[in-house]
Image (tube, coloured by chain):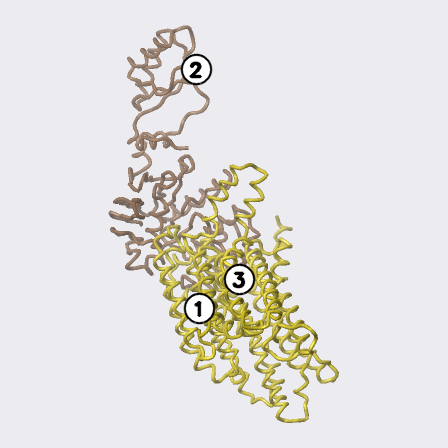
Chain colours: A brown, B yellow
Amino acid sequence: MIQASNLQKRFGDLKALDGVNLDVHSGQIFGLIGPNGAGKTTLIRVLTGLLVPDSGRASISGFDVLKQEHDARMRLGYMPDFFGLYDKLTVREYLELFGELSGMSGKPLAESIEASLAAVRLKLKKDHFVDALSRGMTQRLALARTLIHDPDVFILDEPASGLDPAARLEFWDILRGLARRGKTVFISSHILKELEGLVTHVGLIERGRMLFSGSYEELVQAGATRRVRFRPVGNVPSERVVGLVTEGGGQLAGIPGDEYWEVEMDDDDEAVAALVNRLVSAGVGIALPPVAQDRLERAYLQLTGRDVS
Amino acid sequence: MIALLKKELRTALRDKTGQALLGSMLFLLILFGFMTLSSGRMWSEDPLMASQAGRDLLATGLYSQMVAVILILPALAAINLVREGERKTLETLLTTPQDARNLLMAKLLWPVVLTAYSVILALPVLTALAVLGGVRFYEPWIGAIAVLMVATVASALGLAIGSLSRNTAASVLISGLTSGMVLAITTPIGLESSQTVLGAALPMGFVSALLQDEAVRAFRFQVPILVPIMFLFTLVSACLFHAALPSLTTPYRRRCIPVRLFGAGALLLIMLLGVASLRPEHSASSAANVAAIVLGIATFGSLVLLGLERFDTVGFLRPMKRSAESAGAGVRYSFEWFASSRLTLALLPWLAGVPVLALLVGSEVLQRDSFAYGAAIGLGAIYTFFWVLFCHGASGLVAHRGRRWWEFFGSLCLPAGLLILSFFTAAREFHLPLVGLQPIRVVGMVDELTRVDDLFLAVITIFAAAAVMQVLAHFRGDVEARRVAARADS
């Protein structure tokens, strides 16, 4: 469980965190989403105790990250955006190091290393040096390190950056497995599509402020408009089509003359159906685009009022 | 703490930096050992002369270890810390339940343990030879303690430099100069006192000046002196380390500038203490000595500044690079190379120091034999060149793991230069017509190895060297074997 209340952090004139509140429970996969410089890494550093906030408090499994540092860290598995591995150690030595730093030794440590390596499918590489591993493998090793002392909370800072789609899906499977075991998973990303289908809960952060924090479904509802794309086909003049769209409750978002028009309207299937009927009745043919825009990205754009790439 | 120490030793022994320390300790042990052995006095039938020769051997044997410690250890300790920050491995360590104090202890102790390993390997040989020469059996052990205390001082200094440095290149440059060995190894005639002052103004130069004193022959007198120095350095490095931890784990380094300036101030204080502790004959009584102090402080200060945010070793050259880029591709590549070259960085502070060096030499030249000083200036220029190449090569080795042949060559330049200088010194010993050169502090050069006993001892020394190299090769071979296996797997 991760909790934070009214976190504030300034770097000179820059407000990196501005009254951030957070409440993430066991079994949840919480996705922290925001563009570069939004405050994601600052928030993660505060949650892991690496950075002291100007005000507010944060806790891991009920333990204050600053006042009960040891207890909080015993329950925390942290994976920074840069994996932070020692090239000159073997996979086994690396995991041994972090197991021993968490107070483990002997048979329990050996068993835990085996279990962690099995979980991330690296058992065959345990005697290899870290610098001989591929990027996907180093990423899985970094995850194995966080698993070694069986923490309750996992905080992962942009773990999928630079991974190919297959490796990313494999990684997501491991995280889903952790959540099923009742662990709390907190993951950050600036790529919205990356987390689609993984997260159960979402936080949107922008300029240090948490714009939204709740379940994935709540987020989609919060940005409850739908953007429909189509290309009018036929001899009906463009002005007439625009008029029909407006009468049907839609608002033209894209520029007429583009290959596909974009119409923003209520997120309601019946309203969309009514608009289509209205257009077809007036003799406007409708051609649909091949790919649908994802809902999460649209909700984000709606709430932040900005474009991201 | 044990787990962290184990990790540091594993990574150091599998890395070229740790191997460089052990290798150079061994190299110097052999070099200095031979020079003393070859004087032939140890085998003299005069007991007094034999006893003195034994003491010479003990002193030079241990001193050779100290030279390596003073020359290399600060850089190793500094690089180790800076790299942890650069690779963000420190972040992962700091989010474990370990206390930061354990981390500090491990960072402080691993170079000392590595030194102990080398000293222990050298001790049996030293003891055996020294006893033959009339030294009491406990004296090598007291000397070994002194070496380990100096290693602690050097490690603490390296940790302080690592805490102050912005990146690896800056830490190599700063710690390279603080060793002071560049000044202590050879001295142009007439500049001895200036050199002593300058050497004492540099943190490790201060320690080395203490140990090069005549009292080096009786290490037991050095141990009490080293205790407060060791604690002072450790305290400074501990303060800086704790202050720098946030800046090592986050990119927001600007906020730490006051802390870093405090650290630089503390190091400056140590330098001034070094100068203040000199005996009257070496005090700042002449213009040359004043110039030496200015040169030492200015050069060291400029290197410290290179490590700070404001004078980021690459950042402050970026505007030059940008303007070069806009000038066209042909210019761009050459200028960009120049602007970002570690060679340039290594040269800059020395160029800044040239006017002071000219003052230093000029003030003495007016009073002395100009021919000798011509030779001295030439020697200084050659020496500086070697030093710059060494800095360049060493930082290249760190950056590219020695994959570039010119960096490997550069890193060999200082030892090679020293070797050449030692031949010059030997030439002077034999009254060859080369003037303006003083002998290296360890007196003597090879006469002739005529006795069987000498050869026997030489074999023992080489055997000890081979043993250490075997240990190193084991670690290296281990690494290589695993790498080959990994390649085969993939």
Q: Are marks 3 and 2 in contact (CB under 8 Å)?
A: no
**Residue type, numbered disc 2:** Ala
Q: Residues within 10 Å of mark 2 (few under 14, many from 20)?
A: few
**Residue type, numbered disc 3:** Thr
Residue A37 shows in the view: yes
- The answer to which of A231 and B278 lies nearer the viewer is B278
Q: Is residue B58 above or below residue B9?
A: below
Asked which quadrant contains residue B370, the reply is bottom right
- The answer to which of A52 and B56 lies nearer the viewer is B56
Residue A274: percent from left, percent from top: 31, 15
Q: How many marks?
A: 3
* Residue under the image location 25 percent in, 48 percent down: A5
Residue on which the image places disc 3 = B11
Residue on which the image places disc 2 = A287
Q: Chain of mark 1?
A: B
Residue on which the image places disc 1 = B156
Q: Residues within 10 Å of mark 1 (few under 14, many from 20)?
A: many
**Residue type, numbered disc 1:** Ala
Residue B128: percent from left, percent from top: 62, 85
Of badges 3 and 1, nearer the viewer stands 1
Q: Quadrant of the N terminus of chain B?
A: bottom left
Residue A125: percent from left, percent from top: 56, 53
